Image (cartoon, grey):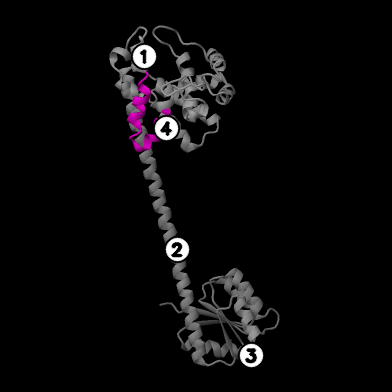
Amino acid sequence: MLQEKILVVDDEEPVRGIVATLLERGGYLPVTASGAGEAIELLSQDPNYSLVLSDIMMPGTDGLALLDRLSTDHPELPVIMFSAVRDIQVATNAFRRGAFDYLIKPFERRQLESVVARAAEHRRHLRQNIAYRQHLEEVISTRTSRLRAIMQDLERSYDITIGAMGDALDLRDQETEGHSKRVTAYTIELARAFGVGPDELRTIARGAFLHDIGKIATPDSILLKPGRLDETEVTIMREHCQRGYEMLRKIPFLCDAAEIVYAHQESFDGTGYPRGLKGTQIPLGARIFAIADTLDAMTSDRPYRKGTSFAAARTEITRCSGTQFDPAIVDVFLRIPDDNWSKIRSRAEEPGFDALTTL
């Protein structure tokens, strides 16, 4: 094992020599300094000392001032003070300022060995604790990085699953193919402009993408009917909100998004369905989605009509502010240029586009 190095500070050379000799016999490696300045310089060059033995009464910077300096610069380094002054107040002052122990000169060899052994053991424990803490921090950092990577992979798996669910719906209803991707991209843009945070934004995006997932349970005779639906068919079609909610709420990572799916056909004035929610009773994500949904519905071609311009959609959304739409969200929508929506639509229609990976 490496010898433990001990710094001995005393202005009297004979005292330094005696203490150094006693330490050497005890198996330690003593290094001597004639004053506080030299001691500070030695520690700046090599801080790996096990402890410091310092006299109190020294010319210039005394031992207590050195103790104060070491308590600041080397707080883990035990300092043993020694002095010929038999004054309890001096000893008490030394302890209050951080001394590990206090010896009265002249001290016996066994006294010195005992005090030094305890201080060296204390220093070893401190070093072990520091090393353990550093090791623990490294382990935590490594495992945190791994966990973060796993969570990212898991999130990606979630989004792939969501994408597959959306693709399944597109296969059933080709008339609105691509609608989920476009409306999700619009919803993300509007939610960001409204100041939605990252975690809630992901939930809103998932709800937007899966808003019509309940239509998987809608009969083809109704979902694909080219003409106007009768009253009974309208009632069945409207069930897709609740059906989608019931499908998604059982999936832990989609339970919050399920609330948006449930409420995506609600209107701000309470005239929507399926529950007739009003104002802030409607989840924020559903209120944002409602505007994005109308924007895409109006600007997309259908077999029975041509899509309108973004400017025309903006006019209609403005007209329905306070009735169908939340006025505060409409105000944010109106601050976004039409050119932004056009660019988003173009990106959303590119092959392989995945709105959820833009988060």
Which SS class for mark 2?
helix
The residue indicated by pointer 2 is 133
Q: Reading the chain from its start, which is encountered first: label 4 or label 3?
A: 3
Q: State which mark lies toward you, 3 or 1.
A: 1
Quadrant into which the N terminus falls: bottom left
Question: Which residue is found at the position 64% from the left and 88% from the top?
Answer: 12
Dots 1, 4 in contact, CB < 8 A: no
What amino acid type should be assigned to the residue bearing mark 4?
Thr
Would residue 127 be found to the left or right of residue 249 on screen? right
Q: State which mark lies toward you, 3 or 2.
A: 3
Say few, some or many: other residues with alpha carbon within 10 Å of mark 1 (under 14 / 14 to 19 / 20 or more).
Answer: few
Query: Which labelled disc corresponds to residue 234?
Result: 1
Distance between the alpha carbons at the discs numbered 1 and 4: 34 Å
Dots 4, 3 in contact, CB < 8 A: no
Q: State which mark lies toward you, 1 or 4.
A: 1
First to last magenta residue range? 238-260
What amino acid type should be assigned to the residue bearing mark 1?
Val
Q: Is residue 258 inside the magenta stretch?
A: yes
Q: Reading the chain from its start, which is encountered first: label 2 or label 1?
A: 2
The residue indicated by pointer 4 is 357
Give residue 245's quadrant in the image: top left
The residue indicated by pointer 3 is 86
What amino acid type should be assigned to the residue bearing mark 2?
Arg
Would residue 44 be found to the left or right of residue 198 on screen? right
User: 319 or 16, which lies in front?
Assistant: 319
